[in-house]
Amino acid sequence: MVTKFFLAFAVVAAPLSANAQSQGFNPDISLILDGRYSAYIDDGDYELPGFMLGGEAGPGEAGFSLGHSELVMSANIDDMYYGKMTAALHAGDEGSEFELEEAYVETMGLGHGAVVKAGRFFSAMGYLNQQHIHQWDFVDAPLIYRGLFGDQLVDDGVQLRWVAPTDLFMQLGVELGRGGQFPAGGAANDGNGTQTMFFELGGDVGASNSWQLGFSHWKAEVAERVGGGHGHGDAHDTATETPVFHGDSKLSAVDFVWKWAPNGNSSQQNLKFQFEYFVRDEEGHVELEGSDPLEESHYDGTQRGWYSQVIYQFMPQWRVGLRYDRLSANNDGDDMEVLAEAGLDDEGHTPKRTTLMVDYSRSEFSRLRLQWNLDDSSENSDKYLMLQYQMSLGSHGAHSF
């Protein structure tokens, strides 16, 4: 599949090359290589009690594996538009998988602080969600991102954002999405299944400190969210039963980031504190597709979670980090066995995790990372050891705050 993609790209790009060069079209192209080694004790099916998992949620493969490599192409299209495409290659259940991660156009020069983005992009829901995986400070996503989004929330749609003409940074935005992917699914309402609103503000405190505070809200008409099963050995559990949720989902979040660098110079020393809190309310029904007779249950649930992390660059090229995650769920229905098989029974457990990491960056184009997780996110506590490399071939865009 990967080979076919590059062949197709070459065929399409070749006839355009001469004309594009004549018009000064010179896209930035970069390749982010990601590889890792993981060691952990429990090799059974991963679960996060109280959360219906999907997407790419999970600890990944044990041993040596390909991580999340990205091919990125971007360029100004003319004086009014900018375009970007990101294709990702990562390890999946059936070997390496290739997918289109982002493909969008964005306006430039509209004036009055307004920008319109259209296509497939990472939602502005939360703080970390807008960042590519190679920008993350840890190998894996926070537990709450794993539980709510299957690691990241991406959708097809349109985004409008506006930056206010004030000394204090203030940005307002809205998104309308298709809702065809986890955690919405089904592209309800004729392909207009999700709506997002977000508000960010921030500023500087003296010459050495800066901060950002964000609020966001996402809601969806969920037509068909497909999750992984969590059978517990009952006689009616079968591999063919797939949990599916239909109903309404509403998610609210607050995030806060504080950065410190001596006199604003982050090259020698810097520190970043990051915090996000999410709460999701859902109501509808869950059914086990493939069961005979059909098993289903009304579902009314609330899931909450937060993480807090601090990253300290104590000398050039070296950083250390500490992160703590904690989740909770309060889900109810008229058939708790069905909800349990969908992963929505919290099993009397409070998922939590502590993570330590140290990394070394020879330059902005390379990074080596060692990470250790004390993971108590499921009933069986586990310890993870992860080694990761990230290498960038070619230029890559500036990172957000």
Image: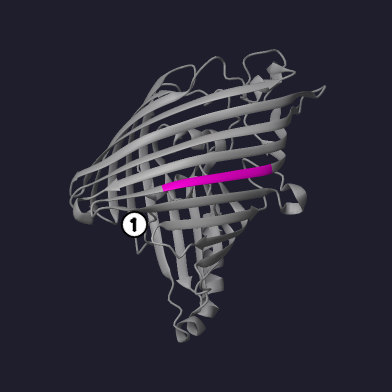
Q: Secondary structure at mark 1?
A: strand
Q: How far from the left and from the top, in percent, is residue 41?
A: 40, 21
Q: Residues within 10 Å of mark 1 (few under 14, many from 20)?
A: many
Q: Residue farthest to the bottom?
A: 22
First to last magenta residue range: 213-220
Q: From this view, report whether residue 110 is shown above or below residue 125.
A: below
20 shown above or below 245 = below
Q: Quadrant of the N terminus?
A: bottom right
Quarter of the rendering containing residue 272: top left
Question: Tag 1: residue type?
Answer: Ser
For residue 215: magenta?
Answer: yes
- Residue 116 in percent (x, y) is at 57, 65
- The residue beneath circle 1 is 392
Residue 306, can we see it? yes
**Left or right: 33, with 115 as reference point:** left
User: Which residue appears farthest toward the right when viewing the image?
Assistant: 293
In this picture, residue 355 sits left or right of residue 249: left
Residue drawn where x is 44% and y is 50% of the image: 131
Q: Is residue 38 left or right of residue 19?
A: left
Is the magenta region chiefly helix, strand or loop?
Answer: strand
Q: Is residue 140 magenta?
A: no
Q: Is residue 265 visible?
A: no
As drawn, 14 above or below 358: below
Q: How is the image coloured?
A: one colour
